[in-house]
Image (cartoon, grey):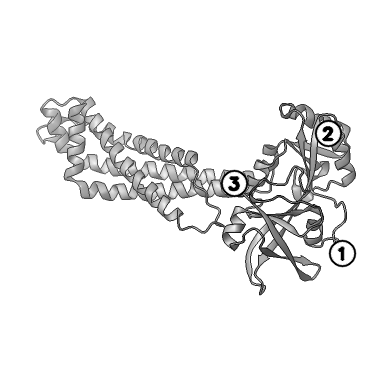
Amino acid sequence: MSTAIHLAIKEIWRNRGRFLLFSLVVALITLLILFIAALGEGLGSGNREYLEKLNADLIVYQDTSRLQIAGSRVGCEKRGNIRNVDGVREVGPIGFSSATVVSSDGTEIMDISLIGVEPGKPGEPPVETGTGLVRKGTNEAIIDRTVALVTQQQIGDTIILRSPQGNEYEYYEMTVVGISDSRKYGIRPSVFVPIVTWDQIRPNGTPGGGAQDPTCNVVAVQLEDPTQIEAMRQRIATQIDRVEAVDRQTAYENTPGYSEQQSTLNTQNGFALLIGMLVIGGFFQIQTLQKVPQIGMLKAIGTPNPVVALAAMIQIFVVTVIGVLIGAAATFGIALVFPPNIPIVFELGSGAMAVGSIILMGLFGGLVSIRQSLRVEPLIALGLGS
């Protein structure tokens, strides 16, 4: 073991310029893979974040919507029937649409998901700062953390929302009463308003103001016993006509493009790892071909094959780890300057998995060069045989 370590480290040090350059190549591969992983996490989180964190056990859709929120409509009568199902603790209507945050002079600041909820019911997010919504028809709003960072809005400030109404744009002034954690939906940060106010603001809303009890897209359901999700899902579907109930994971996995998006990014990540393996394998293959005489000399003086193989494996591991550390540090530095509204999220778990995959791919890629080292014949390598 000590001989293999000595051989590996000695060669790396004597050829440190060459090995450093290759570590930088590994760093660039690491940067690419980590950004693909972060992009996948960011886009996935941007699609599922609100539904994933929803304070409910089931989400009820119109049965003909095929679990597409935009195509689902659940009226107030059905909400009342759902609330009366045995085992249901509370329900809350949720409406989804979009709007644009503008400045006082009408300049666009950012697009947001406008989510209507009933104050104090499932669907309203918990606030980190300020208070929750109080009454149904007020011009109050809870903004999520990303909206607060981008717009610099604080508790008590007025946020202006622009929404198309027919052929014209209408502007609505909302008072910020609370700030929640990040609650993106549709890859956009969210602003939460009372469901009646939402019905007034949403595109092509009810003329002259929202209805007292508007139709929502879906209904969030809290259960008396959260462990009975499957039984309650079937009970609601049986007792209430023309509705379908699913858990939160099924809901966000059926948001438009979510599964396809994640599959595409996972495929890209797989190809990046494959390219990394081929690059590392090719580099060490060339290294092996260049030092065939040295390997032959080592074998001629009695160095066994396991020591030669272990020395090569240590070299591959050290060079790859140095490259991965440089790449990870560069990725972290670049991430610090990203605006908060860019959908890139660096998670410790996914990042560690990506880094581990790169190191493993590097070791696998170097197996070809190790096999080449083991096949070197001392006499032929030294020019003493044929």
Residue 144, labelled with which disc?
none
Residue designated by label 3: 44
Mark 3, residues whose alpha carbon is within 10 Å: few (<14), some, or many (≥20)? Answer: many
Is 213 positioned to the left or the right of 174 in the image?
right
Mark closest to the chain's N terminus, 3 or 2: 3
Write down the quadrant of residue 291 in the picture: top left
Q: Residue at x 29, y 44 (%)?
A: 283
**Percent position (x, y) of residue 376?**
20, 32
Residue designated by label 2: 237
**Quadrant of the frame with the N terminus:** top left
Does 311 sit above or below residue 188?
above
Mark closest to the chain's N terminus, 3 or 1: 3
- Which amino acid, mark 3? Gly
Q: Residue at x 38, y 35 (%)?
A: 360
**Percent position (x, y) of residue 244?**
80, 38
As helix, strand or loop, the secondary structure at mark 3 comes to helix
As helix, strand or loop, the secondary structure at mark 2 comes to helix
Give the distance between the C-alpha atoms of the residues marked 3 and 2, in whole angstroms. 29 Å
Residue 207, labelled with which disc?
1
